[in-house]
Amino acid sequence: MATRSLLTVPLVLTVAAATVAWVALGPAAALAFGALALLEIAMAADSSVPMAGIAGRLHSPARRLFLSIGIVAGVLAMRLVLPPAAVAVGGATDPASAVDEAVFAPGSFSAHLAEVRPALAAFGAAFIWSVFAEYLFNTDRLSRRSWLGGLEARLARVARPRAWSVVTAATGVLGTTVLVGRQDAWTPDAVLPVAVGGAAGVGAYLVSKRIARWALRGVDGTDTGSVGTRGAWRVHAYASTVVFERGLVVFMLFEILDGVYSLSGSGLLGADGLGALEQAALAVAAIAVGAVFLARTTSHLDQAATLKRLRYLKAGAAYVLGVLAVLLWTSLLVPVPGTVVAWFGTVVIGLALASSLPWRAWARRARRRTLAG
């Protein structure tokens, strides 16, 4: 029943958009859109547990804002706006040309995105590792049971956890820069983008957390009612840092690590003879459907306190980020197999879920029933 309720709105939107596509563009476009929308829904389902872990760190009313409109707006903005912005900032082309290429020449745009990929991957790895380090070193000093045993427990008790977060991220940046330099005989063209991108990633993380701490000073975490104008701005600022954090994770996973640009429709739309604007419109609509499903699923997980009842799911969500950061650093040195990119999150979350289930309690009850019988 719960699953049916979660799917109702996204499926209604999918059917409505597919009907419009059928009437306006033909049956092939409608079928391609439906396949792409279902793909986006599947990807959203895989991202909902990590997103719920992020939502759990938010205070009210920032959490309500994040779960209602923040996720949808953030996914759309990061999936559609960040790639052209990254190409423009990386110097591959100017902003206007980047937007034009993203819509009308996705092949050329993908080539330009590949040119700035080393800096982007280094940026994303450093930023995402820093987010993961919040869990690894338990910067909030929360009481929790370690998923991976004694080593994780010791890391969660280290002194000056925020300093350890920065040190480990900086170590990853330095190590990757050195290894990339050795591969390319210390050519500046290879080393400088990785070093600058990694340093920018650590800096962006620190700025984001600084904004979040400033915003929290004006918002009562126990408030469930309205806030004043000044407080509302702080709520928006705080929620925006979380939207940016998760949006960057999605961007790094699909656009940078997997190498599939959103407006290309993952190759599903190009074979139908559609114009560039039609392809872009269908891709945006499919991304929006996935974003709505992600928001509804995350809200359901948050309201049901699933991460609290399944005690290791939050740890699994955190380790997905840690593995993603390591894969991004690794991708600067060697190609990462597509199978790993597609399945690592599902595997980590699956292991966390399996270890959260009360297997021993079930076994004890089964033994008692056997003995009673």
Image (spheres, rainbow, N blue to C red):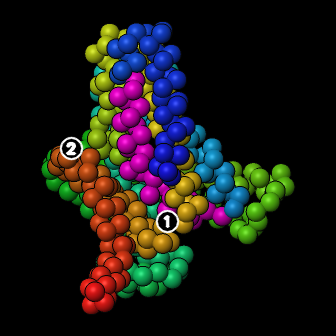
Q: Can you say whether 243 is above or below 216 in the image?
A: above
Q: Residue 261: give x, y in percent of width and height.
A: 36, 32
**Lateral position of residue 286 relative to residue 328, left or right:** right
Q: Nearer the viewer, residue 79 or 92?
A: 79
Determine crowd level at label 2: few under 14, some 14-19, many 20+ residues with C-alpha closer than 10 A: few
Say if residue 204 shows up in the picture: no
**Secondary structure under the numbered disc 1 in the rendered image:** helix
**Lateral position of residue 22 relative to residue 322, left or right:** right
43 magenta-colored: yes
Question: In the image, what residue occupies the spot 73% across and 69% down?
Answer: 222
Q: Residue 136: give x, y in percent of width and height.
A: 40, 73
**Lateral position of residue 182 relative to residue 103, left or right:** left
User: Looking at the image, how many numbered discs can be counted on the residues?
Assistant: 2
* Mark closer to the chain start, 1 or 2: 1
Question: In the image, what residue occupies the spot 46% across and 38% down?
Answer: 290
Which quadrant of the figure has residue 348?
A: bottom left
Determine crowd level at label 1: few under 14, some 14-19, many 20+ residues with C-alpha closer than 10 A: some
For marks 1 and 2, give the CA distance. 30 Å
Question: In the image, what residue occupies the spot 30% across and 82% down?
Answer: 366
Residue type, mark 2 in image: Gly
Q: Nearer the viewer, residue 14 or 220?
A: 14
Residue identified by numbered label 1: 306
Residue type, mark 1 in image: Thr
Residue identified by numbered label 2: 338
Q: Can you say whether 325 is above or below 115 in the image?
A: below
Q: Residue furthest bottom?
A: 371
Q: Which region is colored magenta?
A: 33-59
